[in-house]
Amino acid sequence: MAVYKKGLGKGLGALIPQGGIFTGGRTIVNLDIANIVPNPFQPRTAFHKDQMEDLSSSIKEQGVIEPILVRMRSGKYELVAGERRWRAAKLAGLATIPSIVKEFSDQQSLELAIVENLQREDLNPLDEAEGFQKLIGEFKLTQDEVAKKVGKNRTTITNLLRLLSLPEKIRQAIRKEQITAGHARALLAIADEKQRMETFKKILDSNLNVRDVEAIADIAPLRSKRGGRRQPLTQNTELNALTEKLTTHLGTKVKVLGSQDKGRIEISYFSKEDLERVLEIIMKSC
C-alpha cells in the first residue's frame, strides 16, 4: 500500500520512531467518526468557522485525501494529528474517515499535535506558547530540547514562553487576534504594570502599530542588569557634530541617543513623500 507522506513534513517524520507508520507503511483504515475523540493535548484552542466551512466543502467534493493519525484510548480512537480534517469531515456529514492507528505516548501525542499545527503556520502564538510550556512542565523537557523537537530556534521558544507572563486581558487579546505577538513582545518591554495596561488600551483604542508600542517602551524606565533603574537614553552633547551632519545630509530632524558605545538613531519624517525621500537617501548610501 502507498505510504501517505504529503503534507506531514520532515518534522512529523522525525518524531515518529524508526520503522513506524511512515517508514514501515502501516494499513490505512476507515474509522467511524463517532468513535473518535479529540486530542486532550491539542494546542489549538480556536478553529475558525469560515476556514472549517471551506475545508468541509473541499472534503464534500474531494473526500479526505490525507488520513488522520490516532491512538487507542479506553475503547475509543483518540486523535493525535488531523483534528481540523476530522472536524471538517463531521461537518461535511461523513460517517467514516481514513485513519492510521498507532500507539503513542502522551508526550509524543503533544509533540505531534504541536508540529502539525506549526507546519500549517497559522497556530495562535499563545496556543503555541502553552503547548511548549506543557512539554516543559509536564514532560520535563528543556527549552533546548523543545526547540530541537519542533524545529525552532531556542530564542524563539523563550520569547513565546514570555507571552505567558502577560496579564490575562492581554493574553486573551492575542488569542482573539486583537493584537499581534509583536505588540505583546513590545508590551513586555514596559516594566511598569500600570503603564503596560494603559499602552495595551491605546493599542485597542487607537490602533497603534508595533513600532508605536516599541517607542513607548523605549521611553519607559528600564531595569538595569543589577536590578536598579536607569534613565531613558538621552542626546549626548559629544555626538552633536554627528547629529548635525546627519540632519544636514538627510534634510530632516535627527536624534542620536546614548553614547559612542551604544544607543540608537531616530530619524523623523512628516509625510509619505518625506519618508520615501529619506529612504532613498539612505539606500543610496548602502
Image: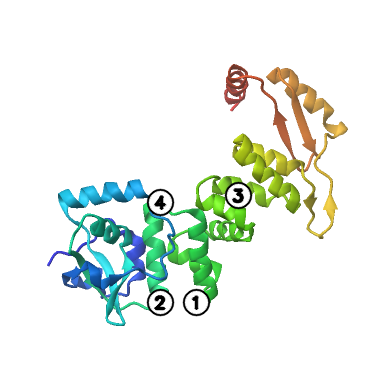
Residue annotated with mark 1 = 139
Disc 2 packing (10 Å; few <14; some 14–19; many ≥20): some
What is the CA distance from the residue labelled 1 to the residue labelled 2?
9 Å
Q: Secondary structure at mark 2?
A: helix
Coordinates of residue 92 in the picture (x, y in percent): 22, 54
What is the CA distance from the residue labelled 4 to the residue labelled 3?
19 Å
Q: Secondary structure at mark 1?
A: helix
Q: Amino acid at mark 1?
A: Phe
Q: Residue at x 84, y 45 (%)?
A: 231
Coordinates of residue 241 in the picture (x, y in percent): 82, 26
Disc 3 packing (10 Å; few <14; some 14–19; many ≥20): many
Residue annotated with mark 2 = 106
Q: Amino acid at mark 2?
A: Asp
Q: Secondary structure at mark 3?
A: helix
Q: Nearer the viewer, residue 150 or 112?
A: 112
Disc 1 packing (10 Å; few <14; some 14–19; many ≥20): few
Q: Nearer the viewer, residue 68 or 253?
A: 68
> Which numbered disc, 2 or 3, marks the residue that appears first in the sequence?
2
Q: Amino acid at mark 4?
A: Glu
Q: Is residue 69 above or below residue 272?
A: below
Q: Amino acid at mark 3?
A: Ala
Residue 121, numbered label: 4
What is the CA distance from the residue labelled 4 to the residue labelled 1?
24 Å
Q: Secondary structure at mark 4?
A: loop
> Which numbered disc, 2 or 4, marks the residue that appears first in the sequence?
2
Q: Nearer the viewer, residue 232 or 124?
A: 124
Q: Residue at x 41, y 63 (%)?
A: 114
What is the CA distance from the residue labelled 1 to the residue labelled 3?
27 Å
Residue annotated with mark 3 = 184
Q: Residue at x 19, y 73 (%)?
A: 26
